[in-house]
Amino acid sequence: NVSMKRLFVLPLLVSSLAFAGYTQEGAGSATFDAKGTLGLKIHGTASKLTVTDDGKALSVTVKIADVDTDNSLRNRHLAEDMEAALYPDITLTVPLANLKLDGSSGTAKGTFAIHGKTKEVTFKYSTSVKDNVVSVDGSADLNLTDFGVQIRSYLKVTVKPDITVGATFALKK
């Protein structure tokens, strides 16, 4: 009976070791850049993000509350416009099969979830590998109206809905 149990446990143990997956190394960071009327330029940063690997896809998540534009009123407007109380996270999910985490670069498709809406997007990325750590740098161009975000005008200045988002993080195999 004991050897019969070992026969069932051994394949499970081997299969779990065969795919250890990726774990996040360090905090990572995210950015967004937006423009508006009258020459407005907004640069936002988040000094942390979360990367998870479920064995099929990598998910990169940024909390809207962690995004800083160096302007407290603008930060409040951002949280209001993104309805951060209802939708606190922005997440990109990418099937592992779509990525080459081997020191190369290219484009891939993933799914962005923003403001309660999900949309497939194409993004650019590059990777480098050193000592079993993969550094990833990626960016995508998004239109916020595709995600149902209302575009704000404040003091006759309007933010344009087209933004560029980026993320930088490291993974260990």
Image: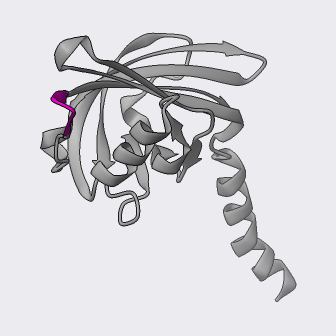
On the rendered structure, is 41 left or right of 102?
left
Q: Which residues are magenta?
A: 153-158
- Total count of labels: 0
The location of residue 113, given as percent across then percent down, is: 31, 49
Principal SS element in the magenta part?
strand
Nearer-the-camera pick, 110 or 15:
110
User: What residue do we see at 17% from left, 40% from top?
Assistant: 151
Q: Is residue 137 visible?
A: yes
Q: Is residue 173 visible?
A: no
The location of residue 148, given as percent across then percent down, is: 15, 50
Nearer-the-camera pick, 28 or 128:
28
The location of residue 138, given as percent across then percent down, is: 44, 21
Residue 156 lies within the magenta run: yes
User: What residue do we see at 33% from left, 53% from top?
Assistant: 80
Residue 17 lies within the magenta run: no
On the rendered structure, is 124 left or right of 169?
left
User: What residue do we see at 29% from left, 43% from top?
Assistant: 111
Give residue 84's quadrant in the image.
Answer: bottom left
Give residue 98's quadrant in the image.
Answer: top left
